[in-house]
Image (tube, grey):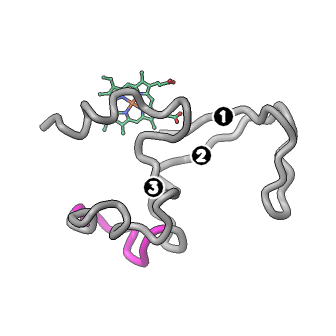
């Protein structure tokens, strides 16, 4: 699952220039297994790490985006979370 975006203007991300018009793909499963951004055990299946909410599960809460982000965030996210 990817979050897909198109740069509407030139964007400078530290030493990386994303030129206007470039398509960007953020691979959510790979992002969520990044031990630098989430936790040292991010690659392990441990749903109990979210018992106390997202802040307890991640070093940086903004890097946990299972339903995407921004104006195109998943419209079914609340339904998905209450379904069993
Ligand atoms: C575990 C369940 C689900 C996951 C992980 C998930 C994940 C996602 C992700 C990552 C996106 C892209 C968001 C972005 O580009 O920022 C998305 C979009 C979307 N999702 Fe879900 N989704 C789930 C369930 C659902 C359900 C149950 C519905 C409808 C009942 C739904 C409807 C949609 C729609 C319509 C979009 C497009 C929104 C837009 O482009 O404006 N999703 N979802």
Q: Residues under labels 1 and 3: Cα distance?
A: 17 Å
Q: Residue at x 77, y 36 (%)?
A: 7
Q: Residues under labels 2 and 1: Cα distance?
A: 8 Å
Residue 23 numbered mark, or none:
none
Residue 37 point in image, percent of width and height? 52, 68
Q: Residue at x 72, y 32 (%)?
A: 6
Residue 31 point in image, percent of width and height? 52, 57
Query: Which residue is under mark 1?
Result: 5
Query: Which residue is under mark 2?
Result: 26
Q: Residue furthest bottom?
A: 40
Residue 17 point in image, percent of width and height? 86, 51
Inspect the magenta stretch and tell me whether residue 56 lies in it.
no
Q: Give the residues in magenta.
A: 38-47
Query: Which residue is under mark 3?
Result: 64
- Crowding near the residue tagged with mark 3, few <14, some 14–19, many ≥20 C-alpha atoms within 10 Å: many
Tell whether label 1 touches label 2 (CB within 8 Å): yes
Q: Dot 2: what SS?
A: strand
- Crowding near the residue tagged with mark 1, few <14, some 14–19, many ≥20 C-alpha atoms within 10 Å: few
Inspect the magenta stretch and tell me whether residue 44 lies in it.
yes
Earlier-in-chain disc, 1 versus 3:
1
Tell whether label 2 touches label 3 (CB within 8 Å): no
Q: Which quadrant of the structure image shows residue 3?
A: top right
Indicate if the residue with disc 1 has its beta carbon within 8 Å of ligand 1.
yes
In this image, 74 relative to 48: left or right? right
Q: Residue furthest left?
A: 84
């Amino acid at each position: 699952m990817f979050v897909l975006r198109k740069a509407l203007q030139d964007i400078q991300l530290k030493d990386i220039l994303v030129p206007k018009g470039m398509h960007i793909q953020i691979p959510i499963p790979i992002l969520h297994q990044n031990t630098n951004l989430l936790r040292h055990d991010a690659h392990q299946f441990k749903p109990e790490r979210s018992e106390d909410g997202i802040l307890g599960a991640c070093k940086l809460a903004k890097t946990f985006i299972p339903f995407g982000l921004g104006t195109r965030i998943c419209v079914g996210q609340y339904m998905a979370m209450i379904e069993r």
